[in-house]
Image (spheres, helix red, strand yellow):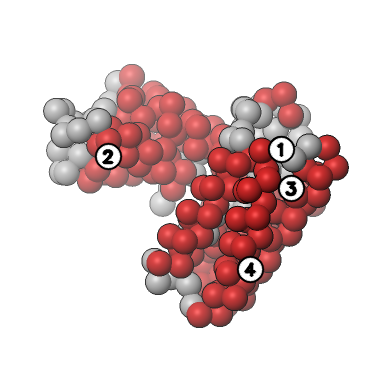
Amino acid sequence: MGTEPIDFCHEIETYLCRKNDGHLIRVTGPSFELVSSWAVQGIPLKVAYAGIDRYFERYYRKGPRRRPVKIDFCEADVLDVFDEWRRAVGVTSPENRGPALSAPADEKPRGPSLPAHLERVLLKLTSARASGKLSDRFDALIDRASGELETARASAGGVRGEARQALLARLTALDDELIREARTALGDQELALLSREADDELALFRERMTSDAFARARDNAVSRLVRERFGLPTVTLI
């Protein structure tokens, strides 16, 4: 798939058509300019799709749909998911100046509370196990991680100072352990495919990054795709 805005817009139009049950909403005029700006910013197609999905999920929760969804309605969700992707991978927008590392602290939106984060992680771990995507080799690790997370959730609301920092460090360690296990579970061929997908996602950012920064971002991007492949949660509180 080309990275030119017109190719990007065509792919978005096709995806939006599927989400609208086959009803074609053209990405033209102002909508074309909007979606083209996503391509210029370096928003990966799968990230844009996830933003569109997020809007549709909220739309469906409101009850039966009355009209097809225009791409313009999805803009806020697409940008939110892109921001989450940037922070997870560790890059800034190619339109921003400065090193292409993680976004400055004052640009990061306030994240979820620790108890709410732990609850979501536990729910997603349970869902990942029930999905059938995880082999039996994950069982012991998930049982142990779930036990630790349940204990942490019981006290997370009152954790402060060094105790909170220790808990956050433990969450990062659990996250690393889950990803290592997931990477090991993948065959070399599938892992190579995910690595190429990570390269495609980062293509627009690469020229502005040092080799070390790109290596970190690429590793983070592969981990994100591995996480997506198995439906695993991000245990680390980002």
SS state under label 2: helix
- Secondary structure at badge 1 equals helix
Q: Is residue 233 left or right of residue 169?
A: left
Does the CB distance between marks 4 and 3 fall below 8 Å? no
Mark 4 surroundings: few (<14), some (14-19) or many (≥20) residues within 10 A? few
* Mark 3, other Cα within 10 Å: few <14 / some 14–19 / many ≥20: some
Quadrant occupied by the C terminus: top right
Depth check, mark 1 against mark 4: the one in front is 1
Q: Which residue is mark 1?
A: 158
Q: CA distance from mark 4 to mark 3?
A: 17 Å
Residue drawn at x 62%, y 48% is: 153
Q: Residue furthest right?
A: 162
Query: Residue 28 shows which numbered tag?
Result: none
For label 4, the residue is 144
Of the pair 119 and 218, the residue shown nearer to us:
119
Earlier-in-chain disc, 4 versus 3: 4
**Residue 76 location, x and y as percent?**
43, 26
Eye-nearest disc, 3 or 2: 3
Identify the residue at horizontal 74%, vertical 29% (top origin): 105
Q: Residue at x 51, y 47 (%)?
A: 120
The kind of residue tagged 4 is: Arg
Report which residue position mark 3 lands on.
Answer: 168
Residue underneath mark 2? 16
User: In this rendering, is residue 176 above or below 98?
Assistant: below
Three-letter amino acid code of the residue under disc 3: Leu
Secondary element at tag 3: helix
Q: Nearer the viewer, residue 204 or 160?
A: 160
Q: Earlier in the sequence, mark 1 or mark 4?
A: 4
